[in-house]
Amino acid sequence: MQRALALAVLGRGFVEPNPMVGAVLLDANGAVVGGGFHGRFGGPHAEVNALAASGDAARGGTLFVTLEPCCHTGKTPPCTEAVLKSGVRRVVVAMADPFPAVAGGGLQILRDNGLSVDVGLCEAEAERLNAPYRMLLRQHRPWVIAKWAMSLDGKIATRNGDSKWISNARSRAKVHELRGRVDAILVGRGTLLADDPLLTARPAGARIAARIVVSASGKLPETCQWLLTVAQAPVIVATTAPDARELAPWRNAGAEILGIDGPMIPGLLAELGRRRMTNILVEGGAGLLGSFRDADAIDEVHAYIAPVSIGGVNALSPLGGVGISAMVEAVRFGDVSVEVLDGDVWIAARRA
């Protein structure tokens, strides 16, 4: 199952909004005879690829798969049919599929046809792998990754707003990898005005992320890198003032003007969920990141800490917004990983 989980990760960025799935086939004697993973959205599922790699050796064998085989016709036929035709006698599944059209139905079909089915091996690892998929299904919104680079004293810019560059080249390369597998990258109006960032993945990754600027007022610059590169990567303006005069150049350049009714963050997340966006990256600044924190909508954090000090009571920290009044209200993160990147410290963590 650990091998199947490692295979599943190879689909990251290519398969969303589908889940990442891996499968490994053992023959009747317990020898590994094939493996596969879901490689792209709309393409063959992991079980089908593993069975194809195994051929006749699958007969009488055991299939290890990280997610319950599907039992419905979507972009591909039901995987349960392929499993039954293969002659496999046992299926070991890490986790049931929460997708309503499956939701235990695939397991039941296999059992009804006489196969031995076990569920729950490495379940926690499988659930972690597909936490964004589960979020989209259950809460109808994307998984939110917050990213920032900061100094040892917790500053993301100097008192004058200078932030280039706090992190080093290797840290920035990691960020580009992250950009290359998400559905959207978000910044606030202040970041767009101060930095005029391009916010594309360089080199290109598995996905081309939509670039979203959040501006309640709709007061944006009439020219910037985004307006010159709409054809390179989609641009969306999320605003509560979709008819603002300043948005005319954006609309004319091909940007989408997305009007949000009600509170910005919940409304925007609901709309991105309707579009089946699975992972989004919030890159700042402090105001936007703080708004996501205040909305209790940060699922994962990537913090890059550089060995420099900045100081200054007016220098910004990563999270603005209202914040909390008592430590008991603090959001706890777990599943922490730490890596040193040529002197910078990269900390990644998820909601506990």
Image: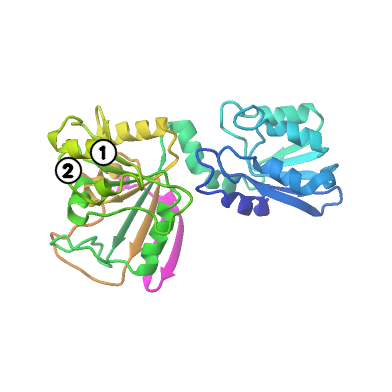
Find residue 154 and report its image quarter.
bottom left
Residue 239 image offset from top left, x and y in percent: 22, 35
Q: Position of residue 11 (x, y in %)?
A: 56, 48
Q: Nearer the viewer, residue 343 or 257?
A: 257
Q: Quadrant of residue 65?
A: top right
Would you identify the image quadrant in which residue 197 lies?
Answer: bottom left
Looking at the magenta stretch, what is its main secondary structure? strand
Taking the magenta stretch, the answer to whether it contains residue 345 is yes
Which numbered dot is residue 220? 2
Q: Are marks 1 and 2 in contact (CB under 8 Å)?
A: yes
Q: Amino acid at mark 2?
A: Leu
Q: Can residue 68 be found in the magenta stretch?
A: no
Q: Is residue 4 above or below residue 44?
A: below
Span colored in magenta: 326-352
Picture layout, residue 228 above or below residue 70: below
Res. 326 in view: no
- 278 is higher (above) or lower (below) than 191: above
Residue ID for mark 1: 237
Image position of 88 with respect to 10: above or below: above
Relative horizontal placement of residue 332, taking residue 217 as reference (left or right) = right
Give x and y (percent) for residue 95: 62, 40
